[in-house]
Amino acid sequence: MSDIEKKVLHWIATGRVGSSSKAMALAACEVQSAKSYPLDPGDLNRCLLMLQQVPEVRHHFDKIAALSEVWGRLIDRWGEIEATFLEEAGLDWSKQRRAPDTYRLMKEVIGNDPNVIQLGPGAQIRFQ
């Protein structure tokens, strides 16, 4: 087992795992999984927490971008999205519990995904 696989396994066992953070971690390890991506700042925060615990995943952003068209767009602008969230809310919501600028940016980058139905503010259903 490689070092990154060991770290990902430890994170899965001990971290806050969401579907999008799990998709990132498993793609970095070249393991087939769902292709979920972060839909809101809460999902994004879990991705950033995973990247803090397993920073080697950043070296595999090309594999994550290849998961889907939406992932490709998110990875292309990951630096901007991450910086906006960290400035606005802080890692793990250390500054405040809202991130409207980050949410607007994420919605812009994600665009219209035919696999997501918006139910209202902050409520979606994703089909995959």
Image (cartoon, grey):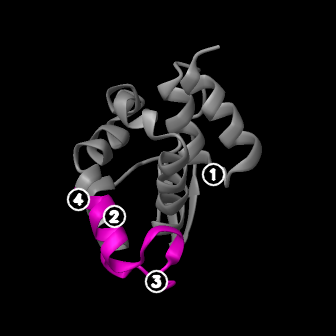
Depicted 10 relative to depicted 124: above or below: above
Where does residue 52 sit, x and y in percent of width and height? Answer: 49, 50
Where does residue 90 sit, x and y in percent of width and height? Answer: 42, 74
Q: CA distance from mark 3 to mark 1?
A: 19 Å
Depicted 6 relative to depicted 51: above or below: above
Amino acid under disc 2: Lys
| Residue underneath mark 4 | 80
As drawn, which residue projects farthest toward the top?
A: 1
Q: CA distance from mark 1 to mark 4?
A: 21 Å
Which numbered circle lies on residue 18? 1
Where does residue 21 sit, x and y in percent of width and height? Answer: 55, 46
Q: Quadrant of residue 83?
A: bottom left
Report the span colored magenta: 80-101
**Nearer-N-terminus badge (1/2):** 1
| Residue underneath mark 2 | 107
**Nearer-N-terminus badge (3/2):** 3
Q: Marks 3 and 1: CB-CB under 8 Å?
A: no
Amino acid under disc 4: Glu
